[in-house]
Amino acid sequence: SSSESVGEKLDYKITGIDPGAGIMQATEKAIDEYGLEDWTVTSGSSAAMTAALKKAYDAEEPIIVTGWTPHWKFAEYDLKYLEDPKGVYGGEEEIHTIGRLGLKEDMPEAHQILSNFNWSEDDMGAVMIEIKDGEKPEVAAQNWIDANPEKVAEWTDGVEKVDGDKIKLAYVAWDSEIASTNVMKLVLEDIGYDVTMSQVEAGPMWTAVADGSADASLAAWLPLTHATYAKEFDGKFEDLGISMTGVKIGLVVPTYMEIDSIEDLAK
Ligand SMILES: C[SH](C)CC(=O)O
């Protein structure tokens, strides 16, 4: 009923994603810093979170999800970030590409392309939307590559072809990184690499690059989101550069909900 608080309506649960994601660590911190001791963040997956969001939104029911930009959900639904006056979720974040130590010596061509990789929210969004609408990730990625040869050429111009060298890209099944990793897989295959994509959770992704069992990852969110991993593995990975700026994480709700700030959850 309308007299219930949002906490009572939601049984004090925030719908989260895979454990170990930076946004999950940030949400635990937010629960602490905003005094939300009755609240918990449920862990699951990016796909389960978007399914729960669709179900609640279609029924115009309350829901709070751990959300991020870029993501197709903002094109699909009327959503807003809850204000975060304590800055727990950081401000503008960046997506970085990280590589194992030794990558430059072992695979100079891949190192060059991975370091050159950058694209816009619209570029990523085009791939994410096609996948959301049911297209296979690799097909959606190929469609984008076919439509953006000049962008891909910025990454690959001047890079020599290779002859079947094996390379492993670790990533987490966030819609944003499913898009970027599928594009990079095809670009590296065009140069002659035999590419394996390894889908893991955030902690194992950083661990794989740090211990060299993966060659690179396009799914590092910095400076704040993955700060704990970057610190834990400081000196054990190479930051190959920023592939996208102006990204963001936070608590996201449908605009039909009256709450505007994380502080409103404490009431
Ligand atoms: C879910 S965001 C793409 C990244 C993160 O929170 O670790």
Image (spheres, rainbow, N blue to C red):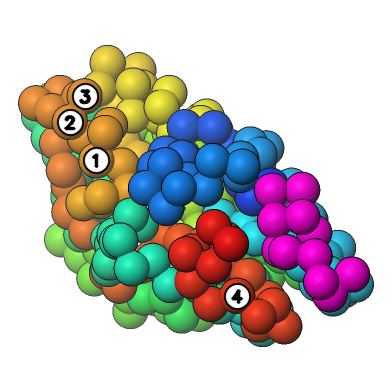
Mark 2 and mark 3 residues within 8 Å of each other at the beta carbon: yes
N-terminal label among 2 and 4: 2
- Residue at disc 4, secondary structure: loop
Task: Mark 2 and mark 1 in contact? Answer it, CB < 8 Å.
Answer: yes
Range shown magenta: 1-12
| Residue 259: numbered disc | 4
Can residue 93 be spotted in the picture?
A: yes
> Which residue is labeled 3 in the image?
232
Tell me if 85 is positioned left or right of 232 in this view: right
Q: Left or right: 33 with respect to 266? A: left
SS of the residue under disc 3:
helix
Q: Which residue is mark 1?
A: 227
Q: Give coordinates of residue 230: x percent, y percent.
A: 21, 35
**Position of 39 relative to 137 (above/below):** above
Q: Are marks 3 and 1 in contact (CB under 8 Å)?
A: no
Q: Which residue does the numbered mark 2 point to in the structure image?
A: 231
State the CA–CA distance, disc 3 to disc 1. Answer: 8 Å
Pick the residue in front: 238 or 254: 254
